[in-house]
């Protein structure tokens, strides 16, 4: 079988989803194929949500949304992402407004980042723990949340979100 695949990455900066390697786009690349996963590349500026659990989630009733990891792939351009969440089992949540929108906005300026987290609507389903993660190689040094110093661990920051605006400023090592 094939051991390598040629893939075209459009003009931009890209990150290998599995290795966090940063790759210049606007060209063809030769990606080694691995049986364990398909090649996936993330465009700079993207926010990717993850729901991590010890056991595989088999249905929406096992999903709580109380703890969500959001991985931000840095960009010098201001980028936005809106997370949609509902309880996972109520019908017609869009019709009756029983859903929550959380807006993420990020931008990198040299060795500093600013990430804003704001409510996208007035509905708060639950307080939650957001784990903000940067790709490997981005090590957080100083962090402020709404101008108050906070602790981070390497490339991860835990934030308690309760529907209020959060301004997160990150300086890298």
Image (cartoon, rainbow, N blue to C red):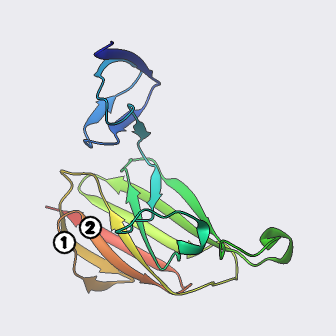
> Where in the figure is residue 28, as x and y percent of width and height?
38, 15
> Where in the figure is residue 94, as x and y percent of width and height?
80, 69
Give the class, few, some or many, for how many residues have Cα within 10 Å of label 1's Cα (few <14, many ≥20). few
Q: Residue at x 53, y 73 (%)?
A: 62
> In whole angstroms, how far apart are the C-alphas of marks 2 and 1?
5 Å
Is 56 drawn above or below residue 135 in the view shown?
below
Nearer to me, 5 or 75: 5
Q: Which mark is residue 153?
A: 1
Left or right? Give the position of 48 relative to 163. Answer: left
Q: Residue at x 27, y 52 (%)?
A: 135
Of all residues shown, which one is farthest toward the left? 173
> Where in the figure is residue 122, as x and y percent of width and height?
70, 82
Q: How many marks?
A: 2
* Marks 2,1: beta carbons within 8 A: yes
Q: Residue at x 37, y 35 (%)?
A: 14
Name the element at disc 1: loop
Name the element at disc 2: strand
Left or right? Give the position of 140 relative to 7. Answer: left
Give the class, few, some or many, for how many residues have Cα within 10 Å of label 2's Cα (few <14, many ≥20). many
Q: Which residue is mark 2?
A: 156
Q: Quadrant of residue 25?
A: top left
Quarter in which the N terminus is drawn: top left
Is 126 drawn above or below residue 103 in the view shown?
below
Left or right? Give the position of 17 relative to 87. Answer: left
Q: Which mark is residue 106?
A: none
Nearer to me, 120 or 49: 49
> Where in the figure is residue 173, as x and y percent of width and height?
13, 61
Q: Residue at x 28, y 60 (%)?
A: 112
């Amino acid at each position: 079988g094939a051991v390598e695949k040629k893939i075209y990455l459009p003009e931009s900066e890209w990150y290998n989803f599995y290795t966090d390697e940063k790759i210049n786009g606007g060209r063809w690349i030769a990606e080694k194929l691995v049986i364990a996963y398909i090649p996936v590349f993330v465009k700079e500026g993207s926010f990717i949500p993850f729901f991590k659990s010890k056991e595989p989630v088999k249905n929406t009733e096992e999903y709580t949304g109380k703890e969500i990891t959001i991985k931000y792939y840095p960009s010098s351009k201001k980028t936005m992402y809106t997370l949609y969440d509902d309880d996972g089992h109520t019908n017609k949540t869009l019709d009756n407004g029983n859903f929550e929108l959380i807006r993420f906005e990020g931008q990198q300026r040299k060795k500093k980042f600013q990430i804003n987290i704001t409510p996208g609507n007035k509905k708060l389903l639950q307080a939650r723990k957001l784990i903000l993660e940067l790709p490997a190689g981005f090590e957080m040094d100083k962090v402020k949340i709404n101008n108050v110093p906070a602790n981070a661990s390497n490339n991860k920051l835990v934030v308690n979100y309760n529907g209020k605006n959060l301004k997160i400023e990150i300086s890298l090592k």
